[in-house]
Amino acid sequence: MKIQDVKNVCVVGAGNMGHQIALQCALSGFKTVSTDVVPAVLEKAQKFVEGYLPGRVQKGKMTEEAAKKARSLISFTGDLKEAAKDADIVIEAVLERIDLKRKVFADLDKYAPPAAILATNSSFIVSSRIADSTKRPSQVCNLHFFNPALVMKLVEVVQGPHVSDETAQCMMDFCLKIDKIPIHIKKEVDGFVLNRIFAVIQREALWMLEMGVASFEDIDKACVYGAGHPMGPFRLNDLTGIDLTYDICMSHFLESGNPADLPSPSVVKKVTEGKFGQKTGEGWYSYKK
Ligand SMILES: NC(=O)c1ccc[n+]([C@@H]2O[C@H](COP(=O)([O-])OP(=O)(O)OC[C@H]3O[C@@H](n4cnc5c(N)ncnc54)[C@H](O)[C@@H]3O)[C@@H](O)[C@H]2O)c1
C-alpha cells in the first residue's frame, strides 16, 4: 500500500482512543468508519463528534465547511464486516487484551481488502504477537497514538521484523497526512519509546505513594512545578485509565511470572472499586463536579 492509494480508514473500538483517532482521520479528509461492539459506546462517539465539530466552529478554530465535510466523512456501525470492507488502513483500538486483539485481527484479515494495512494502537503489545493471526503479516504493524488523540501530535510507527518497508513508509506518510508527528521505531521493544520512559516515572510515583513518602497530589505537583510536565503521573493515569495500567501489569505478570510485574495494591484497589479515572468520574482524583 502506498499513501496515494489510501482513501478509506476503519477504526475498530470507539472508546477513549478510537473515537478521537477516527475523527482525526475524517478531519484530514479520509472517509472513516468507526466501529465498536457496544452500541452505547458508538452512540457516545457519534454524540461527541456532533458536539465537537460545531464547538470548533463556534470558537473560530474551524470553518463551517470543514466541519460539515468532516461530519460527512465519518460514519458509525456495529458491524465489523461492513466497517472493514473498503478499508485501505484499519486502526484497531480495542481493549488491551492479546486474545481479543488476535481475534479482531483474524476477523479483519477476512473482511478487509487484501492490500489493506492492519495497525494496532496497542500501548504495549508488539504487532509480531498479533501478525500471525492474519495471512498478511508484512502489513500488520503498531501505530501508537497518545491521549487525547485529537490533541497529541506524536504517533509511534513500530516496524517489527515482519513488517515490510512499504508498510512502514505508508504509515509514516499517513501520520503526516493526518497532521501528526510520527517517529519510526525500528525494533519491537515493550512500551515503545515514550511509554518506556513514562513507565519508569509511574512505577516510582506509585512506589513513593505506597511507602507513604508523599501524597499523590504532592507527587503530581513535583512533576508539574519542578519538571515542567503538563500533568503529574497520577493525573495522567486518570486520563489514560487505571484499568489500562492494571491490564498492562497483568499481561506482563502472566508472561514473566515475576511478582514485581503485578499491579501495585493501590492500582488493584482502584480497579476493584471501579474507579478507572476520568471515564468513570473518579480515579485518583474526582471528576464528578
Ligand atoms: N487510554 C490511553 O491513554 C491509550 C493511549 C494509547 C493507546 N491506547 C491503547 O488503545 C487501545 C484502546 O484503549 P482505550 O483506552 O481506548 O480503551 P477503552 O476501554 O476506552 O475502549 C476500548 C473499546 O473497545 C471496544 N471493543 C471491545 N471488543 C471489541 C471488538 N471485538 N470489536 C470492536 N470494539 C471492541 C470496547 O467496547 C471499548 O469501547 C488499547 O490497546 C490501549 O492500550 C490507550
Image (tube, rainbow, N blue to C red):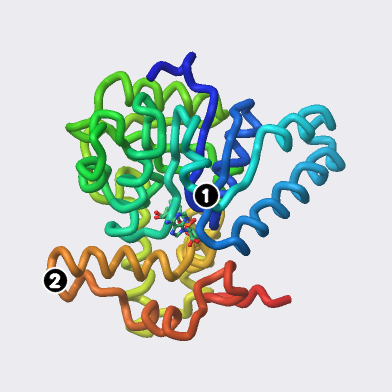
- Residue 210's image quarter? bottom left
List x then y, in percent, for residue 30. 59, 28
Q: Is residue 128 left or right of residue 71?
A: left
- Residue on which the image places disc 2: 258
Residue at 33%, 38% in the rendered image: 109
Image: 231 above or below 188: below
Furthest residue to the left? 257
Residue at 29%, 67% in the rendered image: 249
List x then y, in percent, for residue 208. 35, 76
List x then y, in percent, for residue 40. 62, 64
Image: 231 above or below 178: below
- Residue 62's image quarter? top right
**Mark 1 or 2, nearer chain start:** 1
As drawn, the label of residue 133 is none
Q: 20 and 238: which one is in front? A: 20
Q: 93 and 258: which one is in front? A: 93
- Residue 157's image quarter? top left
Q: 54 and 90: which one is in front? A: 90
The answer to whether residue 228 of the structure is visible from this angle is: no
Residue at 79%, 33% in the rendered image: 68
- Residue on which the image places disc 1: 79
List x then y, in percent, for residue 26. 63, 34
For the C terminus, give its image quadrant.
Answer: bottom right
Image: 167 above or below 160: above
Disc 1 marks a residue whose amino acid type is Asp
Q: Is residue 215 left or right of residue 136?
A: right
Label 2 crowding class (10 Å Cα cut-off): few <14, some 14-19, many 20+? few
